[in-house]
Image: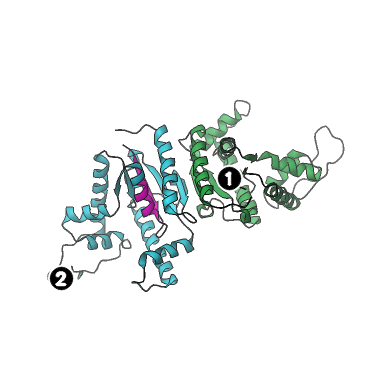
Chain colours: A green, B cyan
Amino acid sequence: MKIITISREFGSGGRELGKRMADILGYDYYDREIITAIAGARGLDEKYVEKTIDSRIWQSIPLTYRRSFSGGPIPQASQTSLLLEQKRVIENIARAGKDCVIVGRNADVLLAEENPFHIFVHADKEAKIRRCMERAGDSENLSPKDIEQNIRRIDKNRAKTRELIGGSKWGDYTAYHLTVNTSGWNLKDLAPAVAHFAKCWFDKHDTPD
Amino acid sequence: MKIITISREFGSGGRELGKRMADILGYDYYDREIITAIAGARGLDEKYVEKTIDSRIWQSIPLTYRRSFSGGPIPQASQTSLLLEQKRVIENIARAGKDCVIVGRNADVLLAEENPFHIFVHADKEAKIRRCMERAGDSENLSPKDIEQNIRRIDKNRAKTRELIGGSKWGDYTAYHLTVNTSGWNLKDLAPAVAHFAKCWFDKHDTPD
C-alpha cells in the first residue's frame, strides 16, 4: 500500500496538486471526505465539524451554535473529541489498504508507521494571494490584505493543531521527503513531475500490502 | 541556458547528487572548480582560499599562515575580497552560457537574475553522520559526536556567508523551488528523479540562450 500525504500552506495549491496526482497515479484521494466521515460517525453537521476541528485550539465554540433552519440545539462535540475521531477516520483509510493521497489533517503524523511519502507544498505570498482571489471569484469582496490575514490565520491554526497532536513544527522542511514550491508552476504541469518523483520513491522502497 | 543551483546541508549528499544530475542531464558541473578558479585568478594557494572563504565571517586568519614546503609568507587576501572574486567567477560561469549545475557557494543568490532552478538538499542527522563517517573512512579517527559538531560548525559558517551576501536565511525552504530530503534514498536512484523534476521545470519555462 502506497500512501502520499500532503501538508500545505493555505493558498499554495496543495489540494489541487494532490487531486491531480491521485488522478495520474490512479490512487484514492482524501481531503474533504475526512470531514464528511467524522460528521457521519458522530451525527454532526459537516460545517460544524469543520469549524470546530479547524478553529484555534482551546478557542471555545459558542454553546448557542445552531444549524440553520433547525429549531433545537444541534449535537455538539469538543475539538479534542473530533480530533480523536479524525485520527480514527484516517487510520481506517490506511487500514483499507488502498493506495491513496491524503491532503492535510496531519495524516503524515497520524500514519507515520505506514511510511507514507510526505510532501510539503508552499508558494510565495503573492502567488498564494492570487490563487485565493481567483478561487473566491467576484462573489466575496476580499482585498488582498484581507486574504493575507486569512492565510496567516489559517496556517497558524494548522500549526497549533499539528503541535497538539505531536507533529513536527509547522513548515519544518526536515519532516518531509519533498518540499515543493508551486510558484511559477501551472499545477497541470507540476502534478506529473511530483507524481513521478513519488513513484521513484515507492519503486525503491518496499511498502506493506 | 539552464542553471541548476544546489544548496545543501553538510553531509546530506548534495554534492554527489549534483554531480550525478549533471552527468544525467549532460550539463557542466561546478563545485571545487570555483575554488580553483579563485585561487588561479588571485595567485593564491587553493587550500588557503578554501580555508579563508569558508571560515567564520570576520574570524581573523592567522598572519603566519604558510604554504607547506615554502619558506616565505604566501600571498594573502581577506575573506571579503575572496568572496568578491568568487562572485566574479560564478558570474563568468553564467556568462559562458552553458547549461550547468553549481553546488554551493550561494550561486542561487549570486545568479538570481539568470533564473536558475534552486534546490536545497538536506537529510536526517543520523544519515548525515553516517555519510560523513563513510567518506572519512578509517583514516580519520572521528567519533559521531565530533562529526556532528563539524556538521553544525560548517553549516553555521555557510549560514553566515549567506547572510553576508544578502541571501535568504539558511535552510529557509521558501527560497527554493525544490527541497529534497536524501534520507532513505540511494543517490543513484534519487539523482534521475530530481533531474527529471528539473527538466519538467525547464520544459515549461523559457530560459535565455
Residue reaching furthest to the right: A72
Viewer-side residue, A147 vs B17: B17
**Residues drawn in magenta:** B1-22
Question: What residue is pinned by disc 1?
Answer: A6
Residue B115 left/right relative to B44:
right
> Residue A52's quadrant in the figure?
top right
The reply to whether residue B96 is in sight is yes
Residue reaching furthest to the top: A138
Label 1 resides on the chain identified as A
What secondary structure is found at the residue carrying circle 2? loop
Residue A52 left/right relative to A27:
right
Mark 2 and mark 1, same subunit?
no
Label 1 is placed on what type of residue?
Ile
Residue B107 falls inside the magenta stretch: no
Residue A176 left/right relative to B207:
right
Q: Residues within 10 Å of mark 1 (few under 14, many from 20)?
A: many
Question: What residue is pinned by disc 2?
Answer: B69
What residue is rendered at 30% in x and 65% in y?
B59
What residue is rendered at 64% in x and 53% in y?
A111
Residue reaching furthest to the left: B72
Locate residue B165, reporting x and y percent.
33, 51
What residue is rendered at 58% in x and 41% in y?
A10
**Is residue B98 placed above or below B31 in the rendered structure?**
above
- C-alpha gap between disc 2 and disc 1: 57 Å
